[in-house]
Image: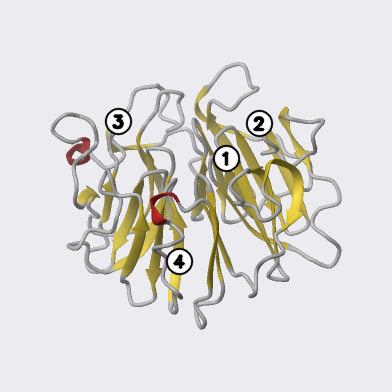
C-alpha cells in the first residue's frame, strides 16, 4: 500500500510541512516524506510545530518552529534520536515535545513551567534528552498526552504520572505552579486506560466496560460539573483546550465544555469511525461514506473553506466536508493540532 499525507490549516511557522508558510484551507499533499512510507503514521502537534512517527517506529520527523531552535523548518526533517531508541508514542505541549518507548521518555524544547520534566535546572534544550529514573521499575510507558503546559504519562500498571503547570490541580495535589519532574497522581480510584489533557484540566478514563471518569483541574466551561458520571462503551476520547469529546463503540459521540466556536458535536454529524481533537476543532472520519469532516474554530482553514466563516473568523458552525475519498482510497489516520488538520490516505490498486 502507499500512504499519502495531507495537511491544512495554520502554517505561519511551516508546521504543515508544505515548503512555505501560508495558511491553506484545502488538503495539500506533504511532499517531504520518503516515497516508501508504507505504514500508518501518528501525528502530535504543539503550538507551532509537528512531530510525526511511523507505526513501525523506524521514522521520526519534525517540522515548524520549536524553541530553542533558531529557525523554523517548512518541511519534515528527520529527528536525531539516540540509538537504539525508537519511539512508540509522542505528545506535544505548546513549546515542548515528548517521545516515549516502553522503557524511556525523551523531551526537548522550552518549558519554563516544568513542561520538559527534566528537573528545575533544565528548562530548555534543543536536543532530545532522557528523563532520568523514569519510568519506575517494573513498569512500561503505554502512552503520553499533553496540552498547553502539562503532560500526563500512562503506565502499564494503570497509574499516571504528570509534570508541568499544576496551579489548577490539573496534575494532581498539591496544586502548585510548576512540577519539574514526573509526579504520581495519587487521587485516582480506578485503573486508568486513557488520558486526555486540556488547557487547565486532565481527564482520566477507566476501561470501556466500567466507563470510569475523573477530571482534575479547572472547571472552566463546566468541564467538570457538566461531565457524565460514566462513559461506558467508549472507543476513543480526546480533549481540546476547553472541551472533551467521547467516541463510543456504536459510532455516536458526546461532548461538553467550551462551545463559542461550534466546538460541540453537531447534531447532523452521523456515525463516526475515527476522530482527532485539536485545540478548538475536531476532525472525524464518517462511517457511512469514509469521508473526512471537521467542525469547530476554523479561522486558519483547518476546517476547510466553509469553516472559515463569512467574516473569516472561523465562526461557521456545523459539519464541513474537508476530504471526499475516491475509488480505491481509504483514510487510515486523521490528526488535529493547534488549528491544523492532517489526513493520511491509503491508495490501493484497482
Residue 120 figure quarter: top right
Which residue was labeled with disc 1?
93
Residue 223 figure quarter: bottom left
Residue density around tag 4, few if under 14, some if 14–19, many if 20 or more, within 10 Å:
some
Residue density around tag 1, few if under 14, some if 14–19, many if 20 or more, within 10 Å:
many
- The x and y percentages for residue 179 are 72, 43
Confirm whether residue 270 shows in the render: yes
Mark sitting earlier along the chain (3/1): 3
- The x and y percentages for residue 339 are 37, 37
Quarter of the image with the N terminus is bottom left
In the image, is residue 152 above or below residue 119? Answer: below
Q: CA distance from mark 3 to mark 1?
A: 23 Å
Q: CA distance from mark 4 to mark 2?
A: 28 Å
Q: Secondary structure at mark 3?
A: strand
Q: Secondary structure at mark 4?
A: strand
Which residue was labeled with disc 3?
24
Which label number is shown at residue 236?
4
Which residue was labeled with disc 2?
109
Amino acid at each position: 500500500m502507499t500512504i499519502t499525507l495531507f495537511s491544512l490549516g495554520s502554517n505561519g511557522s511551516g508546521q504543515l510541512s508544505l515548503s512555505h508558510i501560508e495558511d491553506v484551507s484545502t488538503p495539500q499533499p506533504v511532499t517531504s516524506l520518503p516515497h516508501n512510507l508504507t505504514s500508518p503514521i501518528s501525528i502530535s502537534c504543539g503550538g507551532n510545530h509537528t512531530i510525526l512517527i511511523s507505526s513501525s517506529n523506524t521514522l521520526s520527523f519534525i517540522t515548524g518552529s520549536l524553541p530553542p531552535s533558531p529557525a523554523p523548518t517548512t518541511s519534515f526533517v528527520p529527528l536525531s534520536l539516540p540509538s537504539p531508541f525508537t519511539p512508540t508514542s509522542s505528545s506535544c505541549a505548546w513549546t515542548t515535545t515528548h517521545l516515549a518507548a516502553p522503557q524511556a521518555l525523551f523531551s526537548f524544547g522550552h518549558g519554563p513551567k516544568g513542561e520538559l520534566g527534566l528537573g528545575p535546572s533544565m528548562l530548555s534544550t534543543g536536543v532530545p534528552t532522557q528523563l532520568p529514573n523514569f519510568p519506575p521499575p517494573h513498569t512500561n510507558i503505554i502512552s503520553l498526552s499533553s496540552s498547553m503546559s502539562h503532560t500526563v504519562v500512562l503506565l502499564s500498571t494503570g497509574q499516571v504520572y504528570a509534570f508541568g503547570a499544576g496551579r489548577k490541580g490539573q496534575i494532581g495535589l498539591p496544586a502548585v505552579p510548576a512540577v519539574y519532574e514526573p509526579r504520581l497522581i495519587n487521587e485516582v480510584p480506578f485503573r486508568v486506560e486513557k488520558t486526555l489533557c486540556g488547557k487547565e484540566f486532565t481527564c482520566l478514563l477507566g476501561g470501556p466496560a466500567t466507563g470510569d471518569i475523573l477530571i482534575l483541574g479547572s472547571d472552566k466551561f463546566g468541564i467538570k460539573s457538566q461531565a457524565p458520571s460514566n462513559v461506558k462503551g467508549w472507543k476513543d476520547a480526546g480533549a481540546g483546550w476547553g472541551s472533551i469529546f467521547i467516541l463510543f463503540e456504536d459510532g455516536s459521540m458526546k461532548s461538553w465544555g467550551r462551545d463559542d466556536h461550534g466546538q460541540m458535536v453537531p447534531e447532523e454529524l452521523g456515525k463516526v469511525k475515527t476522530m482527532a481533537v485539536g485545540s478548538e476543532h475536531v476532525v472525524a472520519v464518517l462511517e457511512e461514506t469514509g469521508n473526512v469532516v471537521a467542525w469547530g474554530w476554523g479561522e486558519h482553514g483547518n476546517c476547510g473553506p466553509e469553516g472559515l466563516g463569512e467574516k473569516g473568523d472561523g465562526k461557521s458552525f456545523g459539519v464541513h466536508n474537508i476530504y471526499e475519498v475516491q475509488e480505491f482510497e481509504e483514510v487510515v489516520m486523521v490528526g488535529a493540532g493547534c488549528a491544523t488538520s492532517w489526513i493520511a490516505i491509503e491508495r490501493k490498486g484497482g
